[in-house]
Structure formats: C-alpha cells, structure tokens
Image (tube, grey):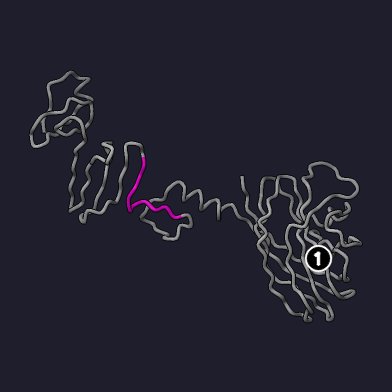
Amino acid sequence: MSLTNKSPAETYRDILYVANNNVGMSTSFKAINSGNGQSSALQLCDDGVLAQPINDDSGTSILQVNNSAGTKLLGVSNAGNIQGSAILDEDAMGSDSNTKLATQQSIKAYIDTYARRFYMNCSFYGRMSASNLYIVATGDTSQWHDTGGTSLTSLDGEALLHGSFFQANRNTTLVGAHGFIGTTTASAEDLTIYFLLSSAYTSDQTGSFTTASVGTLAQAGALGQNDAYYVSASINQAMTAGQVLLVGAILGTGSNKYVSGSLTLEFKTTD
C-alpha cells in the first residue's frame, strides 16, 4: 500500500493504491486500483468469504462476491446488471425467502397477478318462472327484475336501475366466478346465470340499452330441492371505465320457483 505525492485534488480522488505484487502503481482516478492501472483488483477475505472485482468476457469490470466454495452469490456488471444466487426471479414468490433479494420484474409480475385482484359477492334469492331473463337486484337480494323476455342484448332502464352490479371506474378484467346455486322448491330444471356487460355509461340513460353476454354459470338438469350446486367459470372479460356489469338468470323449466345463489366474482385492475 502506498500514497503518492500528488496535488490535493488528485490525492482526494486517489486516496489508496493497491500494488499488484508491488509492481507498478495506478495513475487512473479510482478509489482503489490494481497495479496495472487498468482493471480493479480489490480482494477482501473474511472467514472464507471472497469479494473481488474481476473481468467478464468482454473485459468490463464487475464486482463479484463468492462464498468459500467458489459459488457466485452476487455479481454486478459495469452496466448495472445483477446476478447470483442471492437474487431470486420468481413471479409467484414461491420460495418466500426472508434472506434473498427479488428482481424488479418478479415484483411487478406478482403485483399484476395478485395484488390488483379484488372480489365481490353476488347473493340472490327470488321467485322466477321458466324462459324469462331475470336480473339480480343489487339493492335488495330478495328481489328480481323480470325483463319480460329472453333477450341478452337489449334491456330496459329498470334493469339498469335494479341490477347494476358493478360499474368500472378504470380498466378492469372480470377474471371469473364461482359459488353455489340452487332452488328451495321442486320441479325446477336447467338454471343458468349470465354475466351481461353494457357499453360505457357516464350520463343519463333513456329507453333500452345494449348488453352482451360475456360468461355463464350453469347447472343442467333437474335441481333437487334445497340442494346446493357448485359452479365455476373462467371469464377473463376486459371492462373499460364506465361499463356496467349485470347478473341475470334464466330457468329452463318451472313456474314460480324460488331460486337462490351465492357467488364470488373475481376482478383485476389492468392499468
């Protein structure tokens, strides 16, 4: 180790010089340099742990930290790229480690997949007859809105008032739904739940409005009295700000049948 006889400014920048086998001294302005003045060659050893700047294949200096077995724990390139077993790139964070670092990409992927999700419950109970589309009322779970027909694409304003289950205020995806449906009365068959998506509405609406069926949950065949049928569907329907989601039901067979359900709808924001 040697201090050179330089100006104060140069001494400030070149405080410490490390000779390589005492041959030559660096003239480059680096805090710590090897004897050849070109590549960094600081080596620190502590209980078998080795830390040393080395050269990669292209000759660019990097800092590499190895354990006593020579395994690279951490490497930082001149371009700022980080490698090594101390860094995990797991989109699902499966290791759940409290001693490792995570990549930016894996953190973003985890947030996009899990943290942006939210859930809403849709519970309903009401009397319905076959063929007509009934809209689940969001204000009172004991009420339906009978649309008087089977159309899934054109509904009246009352359906919008009764059944605006969810209106997006940002870009959102309806990921899917699952839960239980059934009837408390006998002789009912083929119950189908429809998820209906409207256009984006941000002003007063008069007359009929347009919807599209974007997903269904169904229990085909006879429904046993007081039986609960588990249903599940992946939907993955994009929604833009202002679009309204309604939940409707059609019964295949039966008159004045009491139908009920408890569904969990999964959403994910996408912006």
Is residue 174 toward the left or the right of residue 42 in the image?
right
User: Against 56, is 218 above or below?
Assistant: below
Is residue 267 toward the left or the right of residue 12 in the image?
right
**Magenta residues?**
81-90
Is residue 96 toward the left or the right of residue 30 in the image?
right
User: Against 105, is 11 above or below?
Assistant: above
Foreground residue, 33 or 79?
79
Residue 95, position in %: x, y? 41, 60
Is residue 172 toward the left or the right of residue 69 in the image?
right
Residue 82, position in %: x, y? 35, 44
Which residue is rendered at x = 88% and y = 65% of the image? 132
The amino acid type, in three-letter code, at marker 1 is Ala
User: Against 218, is 47 above or below?
Assistant: above
Which residue is rendered at x = 81% and y = 53% of the image? 211
| Location of residue 58 by image quarter | top left
Query: Would you say the magenta stretch is mainly helix, strand or loop?
Result: loop
Residue 166, position in %: x, y? 74, 53
- The quarter of the image holding the C terminus is top right
To which residue does mark 1 refer?
249
18 inside magenta stretch: no
Foreground residue, 204 or 133?
133
| Other residues around mark 1 within 10 Å, as few (<14) / some (14–19) / many (≥20) | many
